[in-house]
């Protein structure tokens, strides 16, 4: 059986707030992950919710849904997977045109997968009070070709997507990565590109995946 209440506090930059129950009692903590995807909670929203406890025994709301108010859709949330998909498709085209070797596409796919998994782990850890992945490590994964996977993870897990300070640094890492990718095509960057691609081939040989190229 669900409870009803009103959102009396909401911090969009941090993705959490508090619900005041209709039946009186203490305000209930609620995280953005408890809402339906693409929901924009605001103060004054009437909601249904279920009361649960986290690993530390603290009360929180889960399975939150609107009560008598249309949920607003944030279409901008789809911008992240759209940007990531577009970039990977463009990179695949550049590989097809022999501008970049196939190893480059493999690097981005592998790094993106790793970044996606790490984001998922950090989200899981955040909800259970376990060991967290530092933000600087998330940014390092992004700058070393993992940012497309980070964009997918931010959408799927709804993790770090509303923290403005994190997002500013994240998009800086995206721009830096794209700048490095472009620099590899220049006369000064080509020697490093040769070294990088040779290293990737050695890694693939070690993993027994050289037959793919």
Image (tube, rainbow, N blue to C red):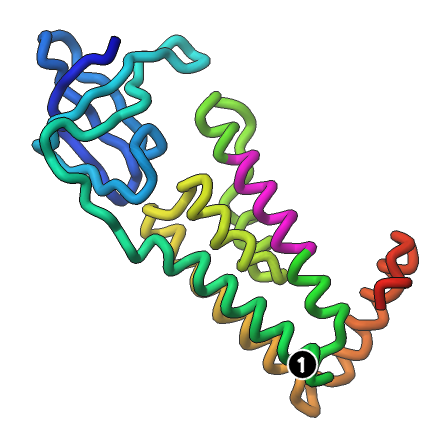
Task: Kindly identify the residue that appears in the image at 80 percent across and 79 percent down.
Answer: 194
Q: Quadrant of the N terminus?
A: top left
Q: Quadrant of the C terminus?
A: bottom right
- Magenta residues span 110-122
Task: Kindly identify the residue that appears in the image at 75 percent across and 78 percent down.
Answer: 192
Residue 9 horizontal side relative to residue 130, left or right: left
Residue 83 horizontal side relative to residue 207, left or right: left
Task: Kindly identify the residue that appears in the image at 10 percent across and 30 percent down.
Answer: 68
Residue 126 horizontal side relative to residue 199, left or right: left
- Vertical arrangement, residue 185 with respect to residue 201, above or below: below
Q: Secondary structure at mark 1?
A: loop
Image coordinates of residue 190 in percent, x first then y, are: 73, 85
Q: Taken as a whole, is the magenta stretch helix, strand or loop?
A: helix
- Vertical arrangement, residue 102 with respect to residue 77, above or below: below
- Mark 1 lies on residue: 184
Residue 113 sits inside the magenta stretch: yes
């Amino acid at each position: 059986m669900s409870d009803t209440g009103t959102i009396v506090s909401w911090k969009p930059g941090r993705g959490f707030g508090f619900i005041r129950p209709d039946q009186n009692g203490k305000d209930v903590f609620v995280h953005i992950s408890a809402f339906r995807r693409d929901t924009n909670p605001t103060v004054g929203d009437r909601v249904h919710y279920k009361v649960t406890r986290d690993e530390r025994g603290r009360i929180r709301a889960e399975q939150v849904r609107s009560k008598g108010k249309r949920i607003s859709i944030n279409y901008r949330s789809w911008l992240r997977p759209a940007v990531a998909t577009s970039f990977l498709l463009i990179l695949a085209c550049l590989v097809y045109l022999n501008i970049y070797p196939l190893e480059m596409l493999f690097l981005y796919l592998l790094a993106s997968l790793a970044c996606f998994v790490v984001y998922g782990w950090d989200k899981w850890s955040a909800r259970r009070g376990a060991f967290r992945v530092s933000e600087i490590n998330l940014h390092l994964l992004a700058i070393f070709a993992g940012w497309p996977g980070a964009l997918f993870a931010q959408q799927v897990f709804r993790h770090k997507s509303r923290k403005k300070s994190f997002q500013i640094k994240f998009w800086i890492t995206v721009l830096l990565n794209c700048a490095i990718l472009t620099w590899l095509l220049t006369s000064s960057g080509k020697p490093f590109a040769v070294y990088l691609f040779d290293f990737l081939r050695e890694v693939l040989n070690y993993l027994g995946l050289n037959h793919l190229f």
